[in-house]
Amino acid sequence: MSNRTAVDSEGSWFEPDHLTELRRRLPITYIDVVPVRTDIDGSVVEVGLLLRASGAGQIVRSIISGRVLVHETIREAICRHVEKDLGTMALPRIPVSPVPFTVAEYFPTPGVSPFHDPRQHAISLAYVVPVDGETAPQEDALELSWFEVDELLAESSPLEEMDGGRDLLVRRALAHVGAA
Amino acid sequence: MSNRTAVDSEGSWFEPDHLTELRRRLPITYIDVVPVRTDIDGSVVEVGLLLRASGAGQIVRSIISGRVLVHETIREAICRHVEKDLGTMALPRIPVSPVPFTVAEYFPTPGVSPFHDPRQHAISLAYVVPVDGETAPQEDALELSWFEVDELLAESSPLEEMDGGRDLLVRRALAHVGAA
Amino acid sequence: MSNRTAVDSEGSWFEPDHLTELRRRLPITYIDVVPVRTDIDGSVVEVGLLLRASGAGQIVRSIISGRVLVHETIREAICRHVEKDLGTMALPRIPVSPVPFTVAEYFPTPGVSPFHDPRQHAISLAYVVPVDGETAPQEDALELSWFEVDELLAESSPLEEMDGGRDLLVRRALAHVGAA
Amino acid sequence: MSNRTAVDSEGSWFEPDHLTELRRRLPITYIDVVPVRTDIDGSVVEVGLLLRASGAGQIVRSIISGRVLVHETIREAICRHVEKDLGTMALPRIPVSPVPFTVAEYFPTPGVSPFHDPRQHAISLAYVVPVDGETAPQEDALELSWFEVDELLAESSPLEEMDGGRDLLVRRALAHVGAA
């Protein structure tokens, strides 16, 4: 049985035990990407959420997320993870600035911050990435759905199906773009 | 003889005297747009500068700039001014966030801030806007040139042909996008 | 009877009719300030809300807000409005950067944006300002209360007593500082 | 002989060989802090630069820099490194927002980005931190000097005595705060 998860898949050149060991020693740098559809005037209309199995075996909504590899630029990491999750036809508009809209600090101990990852201490730079092309769920994702901003802000929102505090990331993204 | 300038052209429904009067009473809200060409990974490769007659009758390099009209959103103002200066085929990617990369405060008295506009106190929200389509100088502009980042950072840069501190705006834009 | 409101008080050198006239012609530049108390590590613990009479005669919660005057810098406007609303002993830490955390566009017509101001089209640069000193409600304010972040995020929050969409401004501020 | 450097000092619970090994496998999360003195209105007046021995044995100017430790928040890391370099009386105003003004990507191979660190691939979140108290160089630093913005922007600036592209970080900080 493998303990690889979708998010770790890029680390296949590590032995799983070795990555586990590193995760006890250092914070791991991540990127989180909130994919959006925009109007012609740049305002955000829809947010894309993936449906996938969490590490804990539950079905959860998620955004695009993954490690930055050694010797890889943040821009390359964003491109790689968007392509990995949305496919090669997604036509993402990678941000012109490296400044994230927020930094999410995931701790293995719940309650240290709003973000929780049982596997590791991850420091994640979060970006909003407009997507213009055709998208389709890849690999481990069961589904990719686009939700209107109003749906996300309503009661019983799909954001409630996210885990580890990632719903907060989407809410911060909506605040940053002026949509909420 | 008219005292209208290129930048004022959208205000033609004001009597020129009336606009002059308003400018003595209130700061005027502007947007400044630094148009850029980007790589597939979002990094800025070139910056577009217009060549036009300044209010003082000199030929200067400039970026896209103009007033926000009453009842107009900032997004609409950005779209309108980009189209006015680069044409209808420019395909600008209007930013997803309303947060500017800097705010330039232009004062009629030189030295109050790095930015100077003899006509008025203008408060300008500045944005970087990637442009994907075909561009051509419009109306009052004599020329539109795309300069590589290295050219802009070299000695005897075209930035020296800008007035009112607008070279600083371009430098801040390059700093914000991680290109300088 | 005067039609001056608290927010307009700095404009007393305008005839009220003249300001009304200007407001029909131009967007008015504002600043909005969310005053906060922070921990030693910079994290936001409390947000200060004023209780005052709205233009419509209702009692509402509000943040610090006001016009930027002609020839005034944004920094001066922030200092002036904080002092006007919190008193001279507030010891505000004015932000080092002129970049606002959001830009709120208030329109006289409801629904154009999430922000509404029946008097005018205002474009407001919004800042979070930590306050270290003693504060007391001034002039028109009935009360100044400090609310913990959890109180603001709970149901039946004091944010519901704000009008014109200003609750959204506080929510965006909390998102920006990583508190929500 | 030890191969520990000032910047690594917090990692003494790692065997040096082990840290070297980790650095070949993962990008290391850093924070960079540009310490500043501000005016009462928040505008930056001076920037503090340390004088210290570089890893290569040269005397260089530097800013505050160091790793984020596992299980440590970014706020804690900023506090710890400021105290480590400026002393316990510095009274830093830790930023209210976790959003850095830029992200510096240091690569061991020169030329991949403007930032270079021969020891490792480091991803550094950079913050401007106003300092109100008494400061003194600590530990490995030979000197701490405060430079006016004009000195930093002049020819033969102390910024030229920085290595690894860190001068660019200070320039981006000045651009962000509107001082250049």
Image (cartoon, coloured by chain):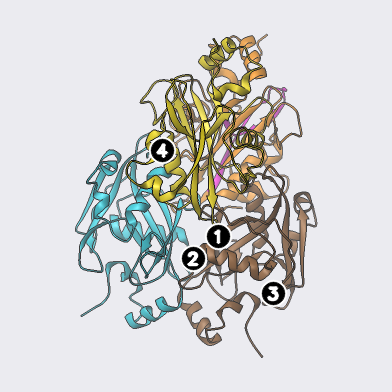
Chain colours: A orange, B cyan, C brown, D yellow
Mark 2 — residue?
Answer: C73
Query: According to the image, label 1 marks what residue?
Result: D41
The residue that label 4 is drawn on is: D168
Side of D46 where C52 appears, left or right: right
Disc 3 and disc 4 in contact, CB within 8 angstroms: no
Q: Amino acid at mark 2?
A: Thr
Mark 1 and mark 3: Cα distance apart in space: 29 Å
Q: Residue at x 48, y 19 (%)?
A: D119
Chain of the residue that carries numbered disc 3 in the rendered image: C
User: Left or right: where does residue B116 sit relative to residue C87?
Assistant: left
Tell me whether marks 1 and 3 sit on the same chain.
no
Residue B117 sits in quarter: bottom left
Whether the residues at callouts 1 and 3 have beta carbons within 8 Å, the answer is no
User: Which residue corresponds to mark 3?
Assistant: C54
Secondary structure of residue under mark 1: loop
Nearer the camera: disc 1 or disc 4? 1
> Over which residues does the magenta segment extend?
A45-66
Q: Secondary structure at mark 2?
A: loop
User: Which quadrant, please, contains the N terminus of chain D?
Assistant: top right
Identified by mark 4, the residue type is: Leu
Please give the name of the residue rendered at 38% of the width and 44% of the height, measured from the top-left corner. B174
- Chain letter of the residue carrying label 2: C
**What's the CA distance linking mark 2 and mark 4?**
27 Å
Instruction: Give percent across and percent down for residue D175.
Output: 43, 48
Residue B168 location (% of width, % of height) = 36, 52
Question: D156 and D124: which one is in front?
Answer: D156
**Residue A160, above or below A149:** above
Q: Nearer the viewer, residue B5 or D112?
A: D112
Q: C33 or A45: which is nearer to us?
A: C33
Helix, strand or loop for disc 3: loop
Instruction: Estimate how packed mark 1 is, as few (under 14), some (14 to 19) or many (20 or more) residues with alpha carbons within 10 Å.
Output: some
The answer, for residue A148, to whether it is visible in the render is no
